[in-house]
Image: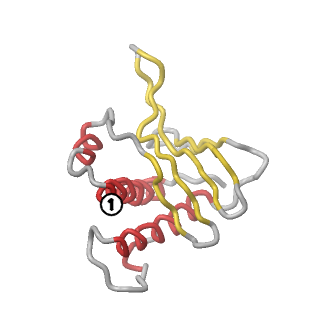
Amino acid sequence: MLVDSLLVPECVYRPGSFTGLMTIYESNFLKLDRLIGHLDPERDSWVSQVPCDCDLHLQFLSREAYTKTIKLTYWFEDAAQAPVPDPDLTVRIYCDARLVEAAAARDSHRHHLLRQLGEAHAEELDRRWRHNIMLNKWLDYLLEMGHGFR
């Protein structure tokens, strides 16, 4: 398992700072690279299924020369309405810089723990920290559960 202690930051940073956020982006890249590897460029959507977790859905939204944008989510069935994506993250991959950013996420989640995480702060840097820490921890969880798109 990939652990954050193996990631050696290029500089000293404090939590909540811009340099710290860039370190999280670097960590996100390493984890996402391990999760998705090199996917067939002809396909736009993928599903990872493991016995003890929800199906993980990945969809390519765009593929540029140095940047790729994907949507990463679980789909939860709800008898009262259509299936609901949650956490429904839009993730931007900066291939040349080897960084991954949670570019957009739902600020209102169905799961109570995800709702609590979103209620803490609203400033832009705080919002980016919140979304990217959530992505970072979720990637840890997905890898631990055995998800992968190989």
Pinpoint residue 63: horizontal percent, then vertical percent: 69, 53
Q: Which residue is mark 1?
A: 125
4 left or right, relative to 51: left
Where on the picture, by quarter, is residue 124?
bottom left
Q: Amino acid at mark 1?
A: Leu
Relative to the observer, which residue lies in front, 77 or 67? 67
Pinpoint residue 55: horizontal percent, then vertical percent: 52, 39
At 29% from the left and 58% from the top, the residue drawn is: 126
Q: Look at the picture and state if 27 lies above or below 144.
A: below
At 56% from the left and 42% from the top, the residue drawn is: 49
Quadrant containing the C terminus is bottom right
Pinpoint residue 4: horizontal percent, then vertical percent: 39, 73
Q: Look at the picture and state if 23 lies above or below 50.
A: below
- Residue sticking out furthest to the front: 123
Pinpoint residue 22: horizontal percent, then vertical percent: 42, 71
Mark 1 residue element:
helix
Relative to the observer, which residue lies in front, 38 or 67? 67
- Residue sticking out furthest to the right: 42
- Residue sticking out furthest to the top: 80
